[in-house]
Image: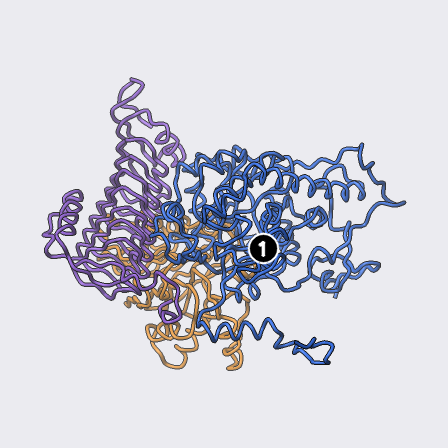
């Protein structure tokens, strides 16, 4: 139960600004997830992950996120439901070197999928339901699926409520379950794609007034690549 | 809050949410000292102008978040921007006009008044509506008018899947395509009285479409009584 | 007809007579059984706990002379106008529709007479109950039937209902017999139809969205009214933590014995956990947040006596709520209606067809003739009497434990008679220091 934000830059001129644009997005989601926060940024060197307990503002300040550059960022503020409040339980879950997943909602059959993965030698390190989805997608990718196919497999296997944002070094993908109760809004301009749980996380982005704003439909994978 | 003149009941008050809290704004709107309000810099904030119960005018310049104008009575609210989940939820009377798009559950459980969304509304528009009139200039998302009990929903664009699922006595008018009607929702004949009421609703909403381009949907009333032969529909 | 026991016939424990009747009824109708009341199966309950009265190591209070106070403040965490109740026993939410207007009025009268609160239900607020209730809690439910912001402002507290103990995760089902013109009008439905209510709120899902919903309700009521969040007892530890995170002033936990007006039998008997098991989970959640006694806990589901009240409070509840017991106090299942119960295929002590609208006691009905049997003034007197007895009984037990206030009862005043109750209530088995599940 949480807030999600993500920013995928299309215009390389904005890359030095990534952190400065991204931090207000994450801070805007504080009330949706006051327990912990986490984020991943992507630059030429790869993915950089920060996860910690506490308020987004403090976490971003402690790691000077505003100064980061790069082409993509994903973040999460967490209101823990059935698992502990620790930095390990914070999102994003990053089971592969360049894969990050954030989730808002609650899976209702994650325990069964967790057992199936475990039988295949894929162990989760926390009791967080979102980690199961991250490792499931990682397995699909490792077996050769592309990210969009992997996310469509989530629809077949996972029950419950979810809005997912999944990023890889080159891709940015959003998916909601068939009920689509957990909020999501996507804004797209010539310069960027931004996604958040609520619009006010996007309100400070440049050119947001002219952005194309979309609420993702249920059971449809929205994906962007660079 | 910036008062434009010093008399006890002013004509217009401007409120800048960059410097004034939503709490201060709502407290003022609940005991209004002006007839009209302009709200600036809403930046998607939640619960703006909720629980109004005086015949005042409120114009919000920019996007508003969850539950904008929730439970409105008597007031006329205009949002020059988009709105988040549950705009005008449980409205009783008055009007709410959204110049942009609306998120989920627009007009949910509304008992009266008029909600106009000039852009599109997403999923569950008019869910459990109980007498409100909703006119959407663009499209509505899936499961709109779910369990709709009373009132009218007018969609000038397309409607998503599951339109009017488990509908009771609400009337739905759609100009474009319908993804699929939900359980117990069927297309019905457009009689003269329906053309007339649709004409009035479109005029009230200021959306000049020809009522002849719309189709009407309503309840087949097959699920009004719980019965074994309907078990697949529950 | 032979006496099966005398004849040495053996009844199956698995396929007993009630089970056989249920299978044959299902085969007959093709529709699941819907009924009222709460879980009827035996579950560990307050009867499996005992209080440790004072003897030598502790000092009791004098029964008829020394004070044992009972007042409670509910909802002072964020609300400027919390509820101040004289007794910690409240009336649970029951709808006009499920109950007659006379029954609702009687509950309001009874509660007001002894200085406690009553609660609306799924169907809106009636003038009768608002008029007769000094402290009225307004339920905010998924269906939003009769939901009116003026009533919200007229209420003394707001209870956001996520679920109830009889059917956590389920919506309501009020059958057409009870959808009278007035009930239908209040709910904006055609009269006489079978009404299916939603199980989820139409404009929010989950604790993050509930946070925003509670903000909206506070803004609408100018931060004056306490906001309760009511959950059916299941994953109570997590649910209580999340209710508090979402901003609740008061959390209401309803165990599986809690009643309903009309729900599937399979739901009533097979979903949820006993009240006894839920309280320690709720208290643990509040304790860990440092908010026990600051966010108040109201417990319901099977409260019948002052002993139940005292034990619930000793386990950590700030107050309790009664529903089924209040209806019984009004005359539900009274032997004087034996013939009439027989005429509709039931008997005193067994009647649970609240969905059916033919209640001989005139309580769970919308039939004007039946409803007229219940005089709201006399009914109010009975409810007040019953609430007084519950209070006196709880005080008696608290004094015996040396408490000058009911809220000073604590888990250490309790022991359990069975291992099951000891494990669930997290108190030692009587005569031992063993709490099953702890210390291993």
Please give the count of numbered marks on the rendered protein: 1
Identified at 37% across, 55% down, the residue is C192
Residue toward you, B188 or C183: C183
Q: Image height check: is A127 above or below C407? A: below
For disc 1, the marked residue is C258
Q: Residue at x 55, y 69 (%)?
A: A125
Who is closer to the viewer here, C311 or C385?
C385
Q: Is residue C386 left or right of residue B29?
A: right
- Quadrant for the N terminus of chain B, please: top left
Q: Drawn colour of chain A?
A: orange
Point out residue C161 in the picture as x, y percentages from the top left corner. 49, 50
| Residue C93: % across, % down | 52, 47
**Element under disc 1:** loop
Quadrant for the C terminus of chain B in the image:
bottom left
The residue located at (72%, 61%) in the rendering is C421
**Residue under the point 27% across and 57% down:** A214
Q: Chain of mark 1?
A: C
Q: Looking at the image, what colour scheme do you see?
A: by chain
Residue C295 is situated, as x and y percent measured from the top left of the image, at 59, 43
| Left/right of residue B111 with respect to residue C101 in the rendered view | left
Nearer to me, B169 or B154: B169
Q: Position of residue B58 (x, y in %)?
A: 27, 34
User: Does the rendering let one see residue A186?
Assistant: no
Foreground of the two, C131 or B142: C131
Seen as rendered, the residue at the extreme right is C56
10 Å crowding of disc 1: few (<14), some (14-19), many (20+): many
Residue located farthest toward the front when viewing the structure as drawn: C1
Image side of residue A5 versus residue C407, left or right: left
Residue A102 visible in the snapshot? yes
Q: Colour of chain C?
A: blue
The tint chain B carries is: purple
């Amino acid at each position: 139960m949480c807030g999600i934000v993500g920013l995928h830059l299309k215009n390389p001129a904005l890359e030095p600004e990534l952190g400065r644009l991204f931090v207000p997005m994450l801070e805007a989601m504080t009330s949706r997830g006051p327990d912990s926060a986490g984020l991943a940024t992507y630059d030429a060197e790869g993915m950089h992950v920060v996860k910690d307990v506490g308020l987004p503002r403090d976490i971003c300040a402690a790691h000077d996120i505003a100064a980061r550059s790069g082409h993509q960022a994903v973040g999460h503020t967490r209101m823990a439901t059935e698992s502990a409040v620790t930095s390990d339980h914070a999102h994003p879950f990053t089971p592969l070197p360049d894969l990050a997943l954030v989730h808002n909602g609650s899976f209702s059959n994650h325990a069964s999928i967790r057992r199936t993965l475990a039988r295949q030698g894929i162990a989760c390190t926390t009791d967080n339901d979102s980690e199961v989805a991250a490792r499931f997608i990682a397995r699909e990718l490792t077996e050769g699926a592309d990210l969009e196919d992997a996310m469509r497999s989530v629809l077949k296997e996972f029950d419950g409520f979810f809005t997912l944002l999944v990023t890889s070094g080159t891709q940015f993908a959003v998916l909601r379950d068939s009920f689509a109760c957990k909020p999501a809004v996507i804004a797209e301009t010539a310069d960027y794609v931004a996604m958040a749980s609520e619009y006010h996380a996007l309100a400070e982005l440049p050119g947001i007034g002219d952005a194309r704003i979309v609420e993702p439909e249920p059971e449809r994978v929205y994906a962007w690549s660079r | 809050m910036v008062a434009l003149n010093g008399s006890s009941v002013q004509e217009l008050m401007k409120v800048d949410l960059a410097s004034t809290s939503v709490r201060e704004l709502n407290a003022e709107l609940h005991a209004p000292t002006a007839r009209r309000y302009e709200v600036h810099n809403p930046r998607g904030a939640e619960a703006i102008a909720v629980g109004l119960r005086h015949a005042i005018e409120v114009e919000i310049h920019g996007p508003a978040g969850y539950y904008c104008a929730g439970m409105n009575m008597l007031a006329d609210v205009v949002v020059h921007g988009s709105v988040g989940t549950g705009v005008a939820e449980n409205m009783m009377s008055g009007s709410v006009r959204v110049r942009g798009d609306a998120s989920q559950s627009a007009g949910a459980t509304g008992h009266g008044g008029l909600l106009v969304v000039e852009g599109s509304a997403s999923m569950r528009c008019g869910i459990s509506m109980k007498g409100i009139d909703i006119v959407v200039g663009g499209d509505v998302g899936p499961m709109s008018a779910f369990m709709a009990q009373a009132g009218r929903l007018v969609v000038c664009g397309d409607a998503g899947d599951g339109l009017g699922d488990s509908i009771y006595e609400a009337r739905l008018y759609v100009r474009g395509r319908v993804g699929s009607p939900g359980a117990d929702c069927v297309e019905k004949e457009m009689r003269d009285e329906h053309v007339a009421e649709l004409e009035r609703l479109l005029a009230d909403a200021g959306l000049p479409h020809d009522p002849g381009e719309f189709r009407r949907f309503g309840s087949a009333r097959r699920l009004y009584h719980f019965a074994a032969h309907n078990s697949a529909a529950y | 007809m032979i006496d099966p026991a005398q004849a040495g016939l053996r009844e199956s424990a698995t396929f007993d007579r009630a089970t056989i009747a249920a299978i044959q009824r299902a085969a007959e109708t093709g529709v699941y059984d819907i009924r009222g009341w709460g879980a009827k199966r035996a579950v560990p309950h307050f009867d499996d706990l005992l209080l440790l009265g004072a003897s030598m190591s502790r000092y009791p209070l004098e029964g008829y002379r020394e004070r044992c106070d009972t007042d409670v403040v509910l909802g002072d965490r964020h609300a400027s106008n919390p509820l101040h109740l004289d007794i910690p026993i409240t009336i649970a939410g029951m709808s006009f529709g499920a109950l007659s207007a006379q029954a609702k009025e009687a509950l309001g009268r009874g509660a007001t007479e002894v200085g406690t609160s009553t609660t609306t239900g799924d169907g809106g607020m009636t003038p009768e109950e608002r008029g007769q209730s000094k402290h009225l809690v307004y339920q905010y439910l998924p269906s939003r039937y009769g939901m009116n912001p003026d009533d919200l402002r007229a209420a003394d507290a707001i209870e956001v209902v996520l679920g109830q103990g009889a059917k956590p995760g389920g919506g309501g089902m009020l059958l057409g017999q009870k959808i009278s013109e007035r009930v239908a009008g209040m709910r904006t439905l055609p009269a006489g139809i079978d009404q299916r209510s939603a199980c989820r709120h139409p404009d929010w899902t989950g604790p993050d969205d509930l946070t925003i919903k509670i903000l909206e309700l506070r803004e609408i009521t100018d931060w004056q009214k306490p906001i309760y969040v009511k959950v059916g007892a299941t994953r109570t530890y997590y649910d209580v933590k999340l209710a508090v995170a979402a901003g609740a002033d008061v959390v209401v936990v309803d165990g599986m014995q809690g009643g309903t007006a009309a729900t599937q039998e399979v739901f009533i008997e097979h979903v949820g956990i006993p009240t006894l098991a839920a309280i320690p989970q709720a208290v643990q959640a509040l304790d860990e947040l440092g908010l026990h006694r600051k966010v108040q806990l109201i417990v319901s589901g099977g409260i019948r006596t002052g002993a139940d009240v005292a034990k619930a409070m000793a386990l950590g509840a700030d107050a309790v709520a009664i529903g089924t017991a209040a209806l019984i106090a009004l005359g539900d299942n009274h032997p004087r209606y034996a013939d009439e119960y027989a005429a509709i295929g039931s008997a005193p002590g067994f009647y649970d067809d609240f969905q059916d609208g033919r209640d001989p006691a005139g309580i769970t009905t919308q039939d004007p003739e039946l409803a007229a049997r219940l005089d709201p003034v006399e009914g109010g007197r009975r409810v007040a009497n019953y609430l007084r007895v519950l209070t006196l009984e709880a005080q008696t037990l608290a004094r015996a434990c040396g408490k000058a206030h009911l809220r000073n009862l604590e888990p250490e005043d309790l022991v359990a008679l069975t291992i099951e109750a000891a494990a669930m209530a997290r108190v030692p088995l009587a005569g031992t220091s063993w709490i099953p599940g702890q210390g291993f």
